Image (cartoon, rainbow, N blue to C red):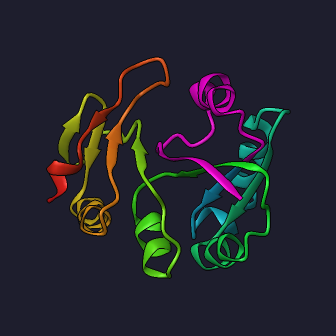
Amino acid sequence: MAIVEVRIDDRLIHGQVSGYWVPQFSVQRILIIDDDIVNDEARKTALKFGCPPSCKLSIFNVGKASDKLKRKIDEGIRVMILCQNPQPLAKLVKSGYMIDHVTVGNMASKQGADHIADNAYVSQEEREAFEYLAKQGIPIFYQIAPNKPAENITEKFK
């Protein structure tokens, strides 16, 4: 499996992902990793409708995603990992599957969250997950769209 992008965007599949990120990386499969959405049929259906026709969509919990990624089940396919927050990525790395970077997009404001970039706010739980990823040597970037410059924000979590 060729992981071409690892992105956090709390909106998951939406216009920017479909219209910009997917074409930018010639994505063939979007892999959403989320322990809650995997059991929410209505949400899964909505995400399937939003998925570009050029892509396949997989929605797995962390355990199944880790297993499939380690076994390289989709080897040769250009995959974008997409999560609402960093916790699934931290769990994925703890399970033994290493990622080479994380790109942060929209993370909406919420009570008690710290502002880390333009439209990215992190809760304490999210901060802890980012800190874990940074300690593993995984660079964290903020980039709202592929035609905008990426800002390395790893130091914010060390």
Which quadrant of the structure image shows residue 157? Answer: bottom left
- Quarter placement of the C terminus: bottom left
- Quarter placement of the N terminus: bottom right
Q: Is residue 115 left or right of residue 64?
A: left
Q: Residue at x 69, y 26 (%)?
A: 23
Q: Is residue 141 left or right of residue 60?
A: left
Front residue (pair 91, 48): 91
Query: Relative to 120, does residue 157 appear above or below in the rendering?
Result: below
**Which x, y percent locates residue 37?**
62, 61
**Which x, y percent locates residue 100?**
45, 56
Looking at the image, which residue sits at the far top?
Answer: 147
Q: Is residue 10 left or right of residue 109?
A: right
Q: Residue at x 79, y 61 (%)?
A: 74
Q: Residue at x 40, y 36 (%)?
A: 106
**Residue 112 in view of the camera:** no
| Magenta span | 1-29
Residue 13 highlighted magenta (yes or no): yes
Q: Residue at x 21, y 62 (%)?
A: 124
**Which x, y percent locates residue 20?**
61, 23
Query: Relative to 68, does residue 84 appear above or below in the rendering?
Result: above
Residue 157 highlighted magenta (yes or no): no
Query: Relative to 49, does residue 40 appear above or below in the rendering?
Result: below
Looking at the image, which residue sits at the far right?
Answer: 53
**Which x, y percent locates residue 21?**
60, 30
